[in-house]
Amino acid sequence: MLRAMHAAPGEPWTLAALADTAGVSRTTLAERFVKVVGTPPLTYLKDWRMTLAADLLAESTSTVAAVAHQVGYADAFGFSTAFKRFHGVNPTECRTACRT
């Protein structure tokens, strides 16, 4: 499951899709995932996407919209809102701070 999320963070993952990939029910996936990882699958996915996004912003010249798309957001506005909620700064501020 982690491999699938890490390999394709931009996929439109749902709990049902993750469960299908793992070959288990949604309930089984959620329970096992929390037991092993410590957070629910979609919370882990959001955290992974935000961590990956910060790395992409720091290490590439991709636009915010391109980074948003790479990590599974349909538009830069929604991504920027989620990014600021998670990191406390907007993507452009993160890019500037991470490069210095």
Image (tube, grey):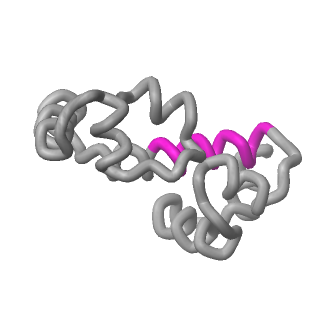
Magenta stretch encompasses residue 74: no
Q: Which residues are magenta?
A: 48-59
When the figure is inspected, residue 73 is found, relative to residue 6, above or below; the finding is: below
Q: Is residue 96 left or right of residue 91?
A: right
| Tally of numbered discs | 0
Q: Is residue 27 left or right of residue 51?
A: left
In the picture, the quarter occupied by the N terminus is: top left
In the picture, the quarter occupied by the C terminus is: top right
Q: Which secondary structure type mostly characterizes the magenta part of the structure? A: helix
When the figure is inspected, residue 85 is found, relative to residue 16, above or below; the finding is: below
Looking at the picture, tell me which residue is in the foreground, 41 or 91.
41
Q: Residue at x 18, y 28 (%)?
A: 36
Q: Percent from the top left, x then y, of residue 77?
A: 66, 75
Q: Is residue 44 left or right of residue 95?
A: left
Q: Is residue 97 left or right of residue 21?
A: right
Q: Percent from the top left, x then y, of residue 87?
A: 52, 59
Q: Residue at x 60, y 60 (%)?
A: 73
Q: Percent from the top left, x then y, of residue 86?
A: 47, 61
Q: Residue at x 69, y 55 (%)?
A: 69
Q: Residue at x 12, y 37 (%)?
A: 28
* Residue 96 falls in image quadrant: bottom right
Q: Residue furthest top?
A: 3
Looking at the picture, tell me which residue is in the foreground, 9 or 56.
9
